Image (cartoon, grey):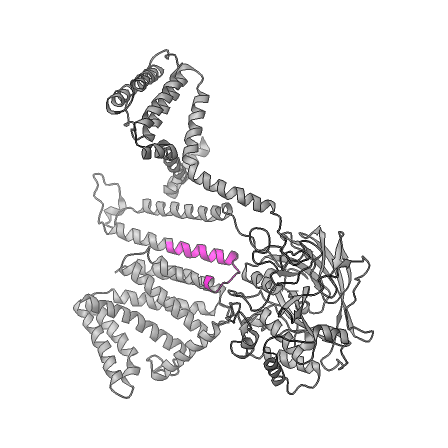
Amino acid sequence: MNVRLTVTAAVAVFLASLALSSVIASAGWIATGFGAIVVVALAGIVTRLSRRPSAAITTFLVLIVVVPLMTRPGYGGRIGAAALIVATALSATGLRPLRAFATLAGYASALLIYFTLGYAHMQAYGHVIPSQASFVQLGSLWQQAFSEFRYAPPIPDLSAVSMVTAAGIGVVAICVDILAARLRRPAVAGLPLLVLFSVPIASNLKTFGLPQMVIFAVALAGYLALLSADGRERLRMWGRLVTFRHVQSPDEASSGPDTRELAASGRRIGLAAICLAIVVPVVLPSVAAHDLFGTHAGTGGGDGGTAGISPLLRVASLLEGKPQPVFSYTTTAASPPEQYFGVYALNYSARQNKWLLIGQNGDRPLKRSRLPLAPTGVTTKTPLTTVTTRVRVSAKDTGEAVLPLPYAPSRLTVGGSGWVEAPGSLEILSTQVPMPGLQYTVVSREADPKAAGIPDLAVPAGIEAQYGSYRGPDASQLRTIALQHTASAVTPLQQALALQKWFLSGAFAYTLHPDLPSGDWLKAFLTTDRRGFCSQFAQAFAVLARELGIPSRIAIGYTGGTAGSGRTWNVTTADAHAWPELYFAGEGWLRFEPTPHGSRGQDTAVPPSYAGGSSGGAAPLPTSPITSPGPSGAGAAGRRHVGTNRFQHQADDNGAPVAAAASGSDLGWAIGIPAAIFLLLAWPALIRLGTRRRRWSRAAGDADLAHAAWRELTDNLADYGLPAAPGETPRAAARRLTSEAAGLSQAARDAVVRMSRAEEHARYAPVALPGDGLRADSITVRRALAASVSRRDRMRARLLPASTLLAARRLAQRAGEVLSWLDSSWPALRRQLRSLAER
């Protein structure tokens, strides 16, 4: 019975289970998971006892678990319970199938009793023995937990979530215990441990910082400890070490052989693994995740997709990638989380059935004193709040300058020139100013409406004509849906609030992996599926508002981000967002938030105070895999400025895509990757060629020429399959070569004899023979050796020379000797250091 292996396996499972901390909100589940691991370890110890005690204990556990079957009406459950008990009891006979069944039954029964005691003891007999009611309670908790798993991580640490998490950890612990302690396959036990790490990866959790790295390193240490424990057990099973001299004091006490060498080897392996884990990510190139401003997403120029890709799709690609810093800011706003930063505005095109950028053909220079376009709809009687915001763009930003601004900006202070504004689009940009590290200050005058204070005034005809209609698919059905959920509302504002309340009521679920039709998806989203992220919610809300007669548009930009140090707020690509804006006469464009927020939605999304929101901090945005969010199509053509639209490819005046110029980094990749592949394949031949040239260039005198010629000969012999024997003299090597190497010409044989004599004199004679002609002799012998072998051996000698590979192997061995100090015990190492210090 391997108690040490069992304990080590349990520790390894516990350390690996800590990886789940990134997908569960708090740490309450850790105690439950640890308890499940302990129960599995105890069950494993019991099942590895001798046959009769193991059968007795496992039969008792199974008897407790099958009580609900025995108390059910009818004979089916009772017969099944009796069969389980008898099969477990018969494991005492030692039959392998019955022992295997009893082992699994012991694990499962122990876990079931544990969960009954922890989560259904009120319904159990004596708070321990399962009953039908306790099974129902555990089943309801199971269903409740999986209803929580629908949402993006991190999920709340409810009791149901803790139970299911502990159950999964327990199953992994059973697999690891069986593989490592029973089957003695600890290396294979790494596969179930890997399952625990696959949960954050499968949920597409993007946050992977220092805590996750530490957890991974600790879990790796647990796995290595499991391998080391198994190695020690195997070594001890060899028995007492037999030696001629009594030098092993542990063996004198019959405690097994000295395993310090094995421990030192394990330390060397661990240190080498850590070094590789640090060096490899530095050496290997990584794919940069560009933010909302990026003109391309990934590698290469362009947007990584079809020309004219919609800004709504760009939001999806940003949320899919790893969060990257975009900008930080300080603000005088009373509630920074409510201050959204708009970059673009979109209007619905009935002709194309798509949401397209506003203001495609109206850019004009921006005046330094004030913005040329005042916010529409605001009157002198509109209550406004003046907010000053100072923004610093991240130094990692790679796009052109498109400024995220809070609505509605009244004054902008920014350096550089060439700033233009697309009328009504929220887009202020420059093709002449680099974005990385850009700083600017914007003064915005935000409407401060009250829910009961917005008058129901007539909407201007221009706004109504441009933003008030929807003539897309399923218009009549969508109007029915809008009226159904706003039946009690009287004013347009009340209708908008009723729509927002419906979206946030729990009838919709937030997911970054919506499963919607690729065509007309809006009706399915509002009636059957009801799953999506901000792009779907913003479009649905804006369309329903238009069906109610309220002008609407969609804004693309960022939420307020998360609080940083001091009064600074930080915004990343994970805060990219789309939201609807509705027009109210006398107030202008007002923001609404239909996207679910909090732990079950987009955490940094905050409804405005006039629409039921409250101030407060925001948490990082949870993420999940993304599919195509629906009918977000190509952006409009005709951009006058080049290379500034961050959400779509550049397009010329006729709508045709404009090819982006290859950047220096792209050219570097185009050259670097083939060069790296060539070096990876050709390095042995290149090193062999370099060694030959360096050897001859450094040979100055007759003795050096003789040594160089002889070393070239021995390397050539190794390359072509005729390596010299250890300790073979030059004369013996020449005799063997001239007699065994069939196919060598007489000139080559004479050259071998001359090189052997020159090497003998260089080694042993007072004066070396003249070295003239030795290089020519070396070339003659190499060509003769190449002609004497097959084409396959010739190619192998040239591309994979054995002399170079052998030298590389020796170099690796010498590099490994650098870690030889790990073999020393601490007293020996201390003596070496003291001796070194004395010298």
Residue drawn at x 82%, y 59% is: 369
Residue 95 in the figure: left or right of residue 222: left
How many numbered callouts? 0
Residue 395 in view, yes or no = yes
Q: Is residue 494 magenta?
A: no
Task: State the residue in front, 585 or 84.
Answer: 585
Q: Is residue 220 magenta?
A: yes
Residue drawn at x 22%, y 78% is: 83
Where is residue 412 shown, x and y percent of the image?
77, 60
Residue drawn at x 32%, y 35% is: 792
Secondary structure predominantly adopted by residues drawn in magenta: helix
Q: Quadrant of the C terminus?
A: top left
> Which residue is outermost to the left?
93
Residue 11 in view, yes or no = no
- Answer with the quarter of the image where residue 827 lies: top left
Q: Quadrant of the N terminus?
A: bottom left
User: Vertical placement of 642 versus 764: above or below?
Assistant: below
Residue drawn at x 23%, y 52% is: 237
The stretch in magenta equals 201-223
Where is residue 627 shown, x and y percent of the image?
52, 65
User: Vertical placement of 252 versus 136: above or below?
Assistant: above
Residue 721 in the figure: left or right of residue 594: left
Where is residue 56 shown, x and y percent of the image?
22, 72
Task: State the residue in front, 732 or 488.
Answer: 488
Task: State the residue in front, 778 or 32.
Answer: 778
> Which residue is outermost to the front?
654
- Answer with the quarter of the image where residue 470 lies: bottom right
